[in-house]
Each structure stands twice: as C-alpha cells, then as structure tokens.
Image: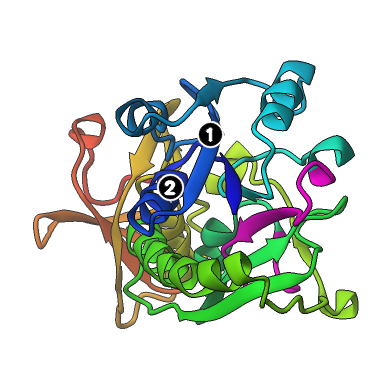
Amino acid sequence: MRILFIGTVQFSKDALLKLIELKANVVGVITKDKSSFNSDFADLKSICDVKKIDCICVDKINDPKVLDFSQAKRPDIIFCFGWSALLAESFLTLAPMGVVGYHPALLPKNRGRHPLIWALALGLKETGSTFFFMDKGADSGDILSQRKIPVSLRDNAATLYQKMTRTALLQIKEFLPALQKGRYTRIKQDHARANSWRKRQETDGQIDWRMSSRVVYNLVRALTKPYPGAYFLYKGKKIIVWDVQEVKLNDQENIEPGKVLSTNYKRKILVKTGDKAVCLKKSPFLSGLKKGDYL
C-alpha cells in the first residue's frame, strides 16, 4: 500500500515516525518548511532526508504543482494528519482508497477548529481521537477509527496533546494492517448530532476578571504551551499567563473582580475573580503591584 503523507505539526511528525517504525510504504511527504500559523509546527523534512523519502515543502496544499507531485507518487491512500486547510476534490479523489484525516474529538461532535483548546476551555471531561475518510465537508466523512480520551481537571494543553498523541499512535498501529489487507470498516457519521467549533480569535484568550475562577483556570490551561497563552491587559501591556491555581476565599463576596488581594500569597499574586480568586506567578511587568490595586 503506497502512502502519501501530509502534515506539518508535532503530531504529524510523531505519526510519520510511527508509520516508518511500522515499515509502512510512505512514498512521499507534503509539509511546510516553516509556519507562523501552527504554534506546534514540526520539521518533517529532516526525517525525510534521513529516510530518503521524497518530500515537498509548500504553502498552499491545493497548488497545481503539489497535485502534480502527488499524482507522480501514485498513492493508494493519502494520510492527512495536521494540516489546517481543506483539500480540493482533485486531492480527495486522487488515491483509490481516499484520504484519511485526523481530528482530536469524538466526531460527529465538536467538528471544526482548535478542538483541544475548546475541550479544555469549556471544561469537558471527555474528548476523543478520530481518524476518518475526508470528504468535501469539514470533519464530516466516514469514521475509520475512534477512541475516547478522558480529560482530567489537572490536564492542560500539553498533557492533553500527549494523551491524544499516545492514543492516536496506538490506533495507527491497529488500523494500518486492516487498510493494507482491505479489511476495514467505514462508519457513517450521524450529522444530526454534529456541532462545529469556530476558529479561535485572539480576544478569546483575554482573561476577564469577572469570570469565575474555574473559567479563568480552564482558559489558562487551554492556551498554555504549546499554544500562545491566555492573557490580561495591565497598563496597556499584554501579560501572558501560563498557569493559575484556584483559591477558595471566605467572606470575600463584597470584593470587586480584578482586585489584587495579596502580592505574596505563597509567593504569588492573588487576584479576585467573579466568584473566588486565582493566584498567578509574579512577573517583571507586575513588579509594582500592591495589595488593593486592580488588574
């Protein structure tokens, strides 16, 4: 089975290495040499150089030269794991077995953009890992393989990314032989159960201290590394917050959200939220803060 591989993020790299480990016949790789869009961008070209796999770095996946490269590889199937653009119909119909895509959610639920971020920001207790056959829609094709992933309150973007990757690599090991033997099942999605998450805007990452402490906590853990971080504005400057802890207070119902309650609470800054409080690490940008100031 001849595989054409498309990807440009850390998960793409891990999946490609897994395929190589499983001795899959990867005949070509389409990737990028850099990305200002993907915060988890990873270099696939160096792997291809070492393993002597033909590779092309592109900006636009549906460019005619990319299609020419792909057709020349005569793939039986295409794996598209980690590419933030829909494929043209010419790509979808290029390989006899179609294109297998990946979405870290329990399809048909939670299609669309930034599924790991939204799962954490919304405080979901469960998400998923889904490989599916791509069609003209967004994350709407038949399911090849799906597994549930529990989300704990302690998970953040980094730990959930790791969980997702571990689960997905096990799935690849399971379904690759089925594809090679032609003994796989396609499960149609129930579109009536589907919803679609929108593209995250920069302002979605701004902390409003009127939020509850749990909402602030969820937002921060959703956007921590490898993502760009949640933030708040202080004296016109954007202050990035990578980690916060919720703090339960007694008799603080009459304190306004955003008020600094302490600048030395367990060596951190304690800030009132809409219901309780959170503490955040000290920063050079906040060095002049005093108890009673407002963020």
Location of residue 43 in the rendering, given as x and y in whole percent from the top left corner: 38, 30
Is 226 situated above or below 146?
above
Q: Residue at x 44, y 69 (%)?
A: 173
Q: Amino acid at mark 2?
A: Leu
Which residue corresponds to mark 1? Answer: 29
Query: Residue drawn 38% across and 29% down?
Result: 52
Quadrant where the N terminus lies? bottom right
The segment highlighted magenta reads 92-111
User: Where in the figure is residue 203, as x and y percent of width and height?
Assistant: 60, 41
SS state under label 1? strand
Residue 288 lies within the magenta run: no
Residue drawn at x 53%, y 34% is 29
**Alpha carbons under labels 1 and 2: distance apart:** 9 Å
Does residue 6 sit above or below 220 in this rendering? above
Which label sits on residue 84? Answer: none
Judging depth in this view, the residue of 192 and 153 nearest the camera is: 192
